[in-house]
Amino acid sequence: MTPKKAYEKALKLGKRIPTLEPIISKDTHYSYYYALNVIKGRFILGEPVINQNVYYGFRYAIDVIEGRWELAEAAISKDAEYSCYYALDVIKGRWELGEPTIIKNAQYSYYYALNVIEGN
């Protein structure tokens, strides 16, 4: 069975299916959506794979954890765009770990200065 099929089965039943979780946990996309839509909370088994994708790591912090997700911070800090969004939407202020990456990107450096630094 594929992660997609396993996720769809759990979603259709509207509940966790522990025997399918090892399958779902192999895919970033379906691990994130399984946590969000089925568990409606953290999916520990899927967190290592979710953390491999900056977008899903950021969304998992926002939508599932609803706060800081320290496991993902090293990966997020290497991306200027998501470092800005993480500072603004999760940290709600300056996020020094992401600043070295942000300052290398003119667009996000401006966005960060305007919305995070001046916004405080």
Image (cartoon, rainbow, N blue to C red):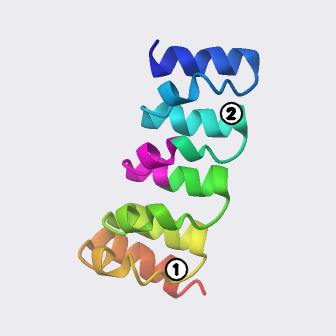
Q: Mark number for residue 37?
A: 2
Seen at 33% across and 67% down, the residue is 80
Q: Where is residue 119 in the image (x, y as percent from the top left)?
A: 58, 83
Which disc number belongs to residue 116? 1
Inter-mark Cα distance, 1 to 2: 30 Å
Decide which of 59, 102 is in the foreground and name it: 59
Residue at 65% x, 48% y is: 42
Tag 2's secondary structure?
helix
Left or right: 105 with respect to 115?
left
On screen, residue 55 above or below 12: below
Eyeballing the image, is 91 above or below 28?
below
Q: What span is in magenta?
A: 46-57
Q: Is residue 95 above or below residue 43?
A: below
The circle on residue 86 is: none
Q: Would you identify the image quadrant in which residue 98 lies?
A: bottom left
Q: Is residue 71 rendered magenta in the image?
A: no
* Disc 1: CA contacts within 10 A as few (<14), some (14-19) or many (>=20): many
**What percent of the width, then of the height, locates residue 85?**
49, 65
In the displayed structure image, the side of residue 94 where residue 80 appears, left or right: left
Q: Quadrant of the C terminus?
A: bottom right
Type of amino acid under label 2? Asn
Q: How many labels does the image show?
A: 2
Q: Which of 89 and 58 is in front in this view?
A: 58
Element marked by disc 1: helix
Q: Nearer the viewer, residue 114 or 26?
A: 26
At x 37% / y 69%, what residue is drawn?
77
For residue 49, side relative to residue 24 (left or right): left
- As drawn, is 51 to the left or to the right of 30? left
Q: Which residue is drawn at 53% across and 87% down?
A: 118
In the foreground, 2 or 81: 2
